[in-house]
Amino acid sequence: MEPFAALARVYSCAGMSCRRGEKQRPDPMVEQMNILRSLKRFGSLALLGAVMTAAGCGGSDGDGSPGSGTLSLQITDAAVDSAEHVYIQFSGLEIQAAGGMRTTLYYCQDPADPTKTLVSQTPCTTLPAPKRLDLLMLSGGLAEVLLNQFTLPSGHYAWIRLMVDTAGTRDSYIVVGGVEHELEIPSGDETGLKLNRGFNVPAGGSADFTIDFDLRKSVHLTGTGEYLLRPTLRLADNAVTGAIAGTVNAALVPAGCTPAVYVFEGGGVTPDDIDGTPADPVTTAPVKLDSGTYKYKAAFLEAGTYTVAYTCQAALDDPGVNDALAFSGAATVPVAAKTNTVHDF
Ligand SMILES: [Ca+2]
Ligand SMILES: [Ca+2]
């Protein structure tokens, strides 16, 4: 699994200053387009950012808040079956405090070392350095750092928005059968990808979350052959997450099967497809052949009780349509924090 080996380096370097050695730097024309697009995109946000900075909103003191803590974010995904690559290009983040303060962060080139990326609270004065990630490389418990121990005023936060580049060519795109297709976000790229779950940054402490970007739920192919990104993002608190993992009997994986394990919140759930109506899985895990054994891992699940079920028909599940998928082996499985629960099919 060579791509995974490359990703492993992410964990050993210093967060936001990491250099993704396996990525090629874009050519100058692409860079130019990125700059123009970012200027256009962030024109209004830049003003907002400047106002908030002037008001001391981005700082850890001087605004009457009791203190500060840090926020760390990483991103993982549940795989989509038909694609070889799903590239999403992130240009920054917005973090909305419940009290009304908003922090806008931009990925920019480090002026001291253009091969490095830093997180800026103002629009980039150097070239933008968006993070383009192949989310298909991030399944089975792997994740990539989006934000590493970033200091924020402590308190309650209402939402996070991931700013995604889709306006350009080959910024966010999907590769299916060797053919590249642009990914579009139907609601407009100004909206980005919003995580509406609230969270706390404790005073003097840290908040550490994983964003599960479920591609099986998120990538829609329209009748006109356009690929749309309607992301279903899940925010999991790493302090209380565990995983369910196990093997699948080869007899359950006949020719033509697209095997996956669907994971539902709660015990005794009757398994159902992804269609936006209950029950919908909280996440799905692909089943992969590893040294002659079929294995799966559903990671970053918050402690609690889940129902797992196996299907051979994952490729048939259109997230916008009610599909009659056949499931087998539905079982209730408890998940404890920092624990890997084994469940075999
Ligand atoms: Ca459903
Ligand atoms: Ca469906």
Image (cartoon, rainbow, N blue to C red):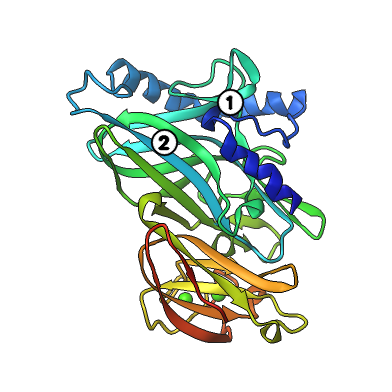
Relative to the observer, which residue lies in front, 104 or 2?
2
Q: Residues within 10 Å of mark 1 (few under 14, many from 20)?
A: many
Q: Which residue is mark 1?
A: 117
Q: Which comes sooner in the sequence, label 1 or label 2?
A: 2
Residue 174 location, x and y as percent? 70, 52
Q: Residue at x 74, y 68 (%)?
A: 291
Q: Which residue is mark 2?
A: 94
Q: Dividing the picture into quarters, in which one does residue 33 lie?
A: top right
- Please, what secondary structure does the residue beneath circle 1 have? strand
Q: Residue at x 62, y 20 (%)?
A: 127
Residue 117 location, x and y as percent? 58, 25
* Left or right of residue 227: residue 235: left
Mark 1 vs mark 2: give the one in front. Answer: 1
Q: Which mark is residue 29?
A: none
Check the image and report above or below for 54 versus 330: above
* Left or right of residue 11: residue 268: left
Q: Amino acid at mark 2?
A: Glu
Relative to the observer, which residue lies in front, 259 or 103?
259
Quadrant showing the N terminus:
bottom right
Q: Amino acid at mark 1?
A: Thr
Residue positioned most to the right: 178
Q: Dividing the picture into quarters, in which one does residue 97 lie?
A: top left
Ligand 2 quarter of the rendering = bottom right
Residue 338 location, x and y as percent? 41, 57
Q: Residue at x 61, y 75 (%)?
A: 247
Question: Separation of disc 1 and disc 2 at Cα?
Answer: 17 Å
Q: Dividing the picture into quarters, in which one does residue 66 lie?
A: top left
The reply to whether residue 229 is in sight is: yes
Check the image and report above or below for 117 versus 269: above
Quadrant showing the C terminus:
bottom right
